[in-house]
């Protein structure tokens, strides 16, 4: 019985895969003609054969644009796939990635009655008890839509509701995507390096999290807290009484939508100050707090004159571990001081570049990235551009990119784009200066290095203690690894002596 059921499911997934493949072929987005020159002869012949079936839409736009259009039509999982692919400029090149990044996620809303019923069921109360006023949808995407409402106590709120049946749709399409990943991995050996199956699993994982509004509520609450510390950006408070698995309620943001071009013409708006605030808010979140709003496009931003900026939509939260923030500080500082060997060392130390590569050759490649950038005026300097050039050249050295770093770079591109549209001559560097300066000073100060050293020593001690706790691997190991009081004192003494030595070196 079970076997039969799963075979049926697989058949359904296979049929959906064929349908999706057909749609991609029609748009010449599967093996685009632009790739012909680099394809092996056999594949090229197959690709040319498939292209006989392509339709009118195949003739419009670059491959990334054609793919984006097709994925929009294929539904939520395909849209998410496109969004994740767009973060891989290091693999697909910057043009393709930025074309994909423009993929739009907008759909007609589902009916108001259905939305109301959904809220009642999820929150377990009659709608009138919670939201006496409940309006039409104000925005609708592939996973959810938002409504404006008023609560019984008069608070104005935005209520975000998952699309009915979306979980089932995502589950079906996920099976198809996994099948595609598995087939690519099995049938196309050169693609194995990109780990298509693991990639599909990542896409599906991030979608699953977006399908739980409680998770998004937690992201909103965390970011609101972080933003309050710096004051450069605001976010709406979560209304926890209105949160359930499929419903999220946030305080209504009363600002002017940045997605509306008319907003930029509103008198009394200090566009340059808003651009500054946006850049600083983002950098402080990522570099100081290690957690950032990773979807800062105009559709999620509102402004209040003269220079206030408010963000909504906490579906994607980026995180940077302390080591990653340190690495970023190292490379940025290295580039600023044109100390390419130092930047190279940071890559090897972080384990991003495999040790068998030559650090000197790597430093030379970094010089190729850095020197042209530093011939430019400060206003042309862009951190996201620097990072994207860096990712391009480091691919030559088998650099393993951490996904969180790629998400950071992608968000930087978005943020810098919004800032430039707000104020075309915006000097990103000047805006970023206070945040970056204080962060580099903190990360690379002797005190920070000392703390690093202490952390390292503590980690080592903890590892030794853990080994002892883990017990009998063999008696000999346990005997020698169990820290006796004498050993602990010895280790502590060594750590202090080492720290003092390091401090003396750094201060001399
Ligand atoms: N707290 C809020 N206040 C005002 N409008 C909001 C609020 N939250 C969402 N919206 C509106 O609803 C739209 C969709 O919500 P969003 O959270 O961005 O969902 P999606 O993930 O579908 O983009 C937003 O672009 C914005 O116009
Ligand atoms: Mg949004």
Image (spheres, rainbow, N blue to C red):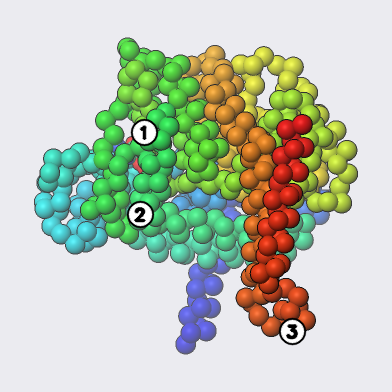
SS at mark 2 in the image: helix
**Relative vertical location of residue 388 with respect to residue 479 in this rendering, above or below:** above
Among the 4 quarters of the image, the one containing residue 392: top right
**Circle count:** 3
Q: Is residue 264 above or below residue 156?
A: above
Which label's residue is closer to the chain start, 2 or 3? 2
State the residue at coordinates (69%, 30%): 333
Residue under label 3, please give it: 475
- Dot 2 corresponds to which residue? 213
Helix, strand, or loop for circle 3?
A: helix
Mark 1 to mark 2 CA distance (whole Å): 20 Å
Q: Nearer the viewer, residue 159 or 317?
A: 317
Quadrant in which ligand 1 is drawn: top left
Report the residue at 29% width, 58% height from top: 244
Residue ID at (67%, 14%): 377
Is residue 61 something that shows in the picture?
A: no
Q: Please report the residue visible at 20 percent of the width from the left and 38 percent of the height from the top.
A: 156
| Vertical position of residue 110 compared to residue 168: above or below | above
In which quadrant of the rendered view does residue 467 lie? Answer: bottom right
Instruction: Name the mark nearer the viewer: 1 or 2.
Output: 1
Residue 80 visible (yes or no) = yes
């Amino acid at each position: 019985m079970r076997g039969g059921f799963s075979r049926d499911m697989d058949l359904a997934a296979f049929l959906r895969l064929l349908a999706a493949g057909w749609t991609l072929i029609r748009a010449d987005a599967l093996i685009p003609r632009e790739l012909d020159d680099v394809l092996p002869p056999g594949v090229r012949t197959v690709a040319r054969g498939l292209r006989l079936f392509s339709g009118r839409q195949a003739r419009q736009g670059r491959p990334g644009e054609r793919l984006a259009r097709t994925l929009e039509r294929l539904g939520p999982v395909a849209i998410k796939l496109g969004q994740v692919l767009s973060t891989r400029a290091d693999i697909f090149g910057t043009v393709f990635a930025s074309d994909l990044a423009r993929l739009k996620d907008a759909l007609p809303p589902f009916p108001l009655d259905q939305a109301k019923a959904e809220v009642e069921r999820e929150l377990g109360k009659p709608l009138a008890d919670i939201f006496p006023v409940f309006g039409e949808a104000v925005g609708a995407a592939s996973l959810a839509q938002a409504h404006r409402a008023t609560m019984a106590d008069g608070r104005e709120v935005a209520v975000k509701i998952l699309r009915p049946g979306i979980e089932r749709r995502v589950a079906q399409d996920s099976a198809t995507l996994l099948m595609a990943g598995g087939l690519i991995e099995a049938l196309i050996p050169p693609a194995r390096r990109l780990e298509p199956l693991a990639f599909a699993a990542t896409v599906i994982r991030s979608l699953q999290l977006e399908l739980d509004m409680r998770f998004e509520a937690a992201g909103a609450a965390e970011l609101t807290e972080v933003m309050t510390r710096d004051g450069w950006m605001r976010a709406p408070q979560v209304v926890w009484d209105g949160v359930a698995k499929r419903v999220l309620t946030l305080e209504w943001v009363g600002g002017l939508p940045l997605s509306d071009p008319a907003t930029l013409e509103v008198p009394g708006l200090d566009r340059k100050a808003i651009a500054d605030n946006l850049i600083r808010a983002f950098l402080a979140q990522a570099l100081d707090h290690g957690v950032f709003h990773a979807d800062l496009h105009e559709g999620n931003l509102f402004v209040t004159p003269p220079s206030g900026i408010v963000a909504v939509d906490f579906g994607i939260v980026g995180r940077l571990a302390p080591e990653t923030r340190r690495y970023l500080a190292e490379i940025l500082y290295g580039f600023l001081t044109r100390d390419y060997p130092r930047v190279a060392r940071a890559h090897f130390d972080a384990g991003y570049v495999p040790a068998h590569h030559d650090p000197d050759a790597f430093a030379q490649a970094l010089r190729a990235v850095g020197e042209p950038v530093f011939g430019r005026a400060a206003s042309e300097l862009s951190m996201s551009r620097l990072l994207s050039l860096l990712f391009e050249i480091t691919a030559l050295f088998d650099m393993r990119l951490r996904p969180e770093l790629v998400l950071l770079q992608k968000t930087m591109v978005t943020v810098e784009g919004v800032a430039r549209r707000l104020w075309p001559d915006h000097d990103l560097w000047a805006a970023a200066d206070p945040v970056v300066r204080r962060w580099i000073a903190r990360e690379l100060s002797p005190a920070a290095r000392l703390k690093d050293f202490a952390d390292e020593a503590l980690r080592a001690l903890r590892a030794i203690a853990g080994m002892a706790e883990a017990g009998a691997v063999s008696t000999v190991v346990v005997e020698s690894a169990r820290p006796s009081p004498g050993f602990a004192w010895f280790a502590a003494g060594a750590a202090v002596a080492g720290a003092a030595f390091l401090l003396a070196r750094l201060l001399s």
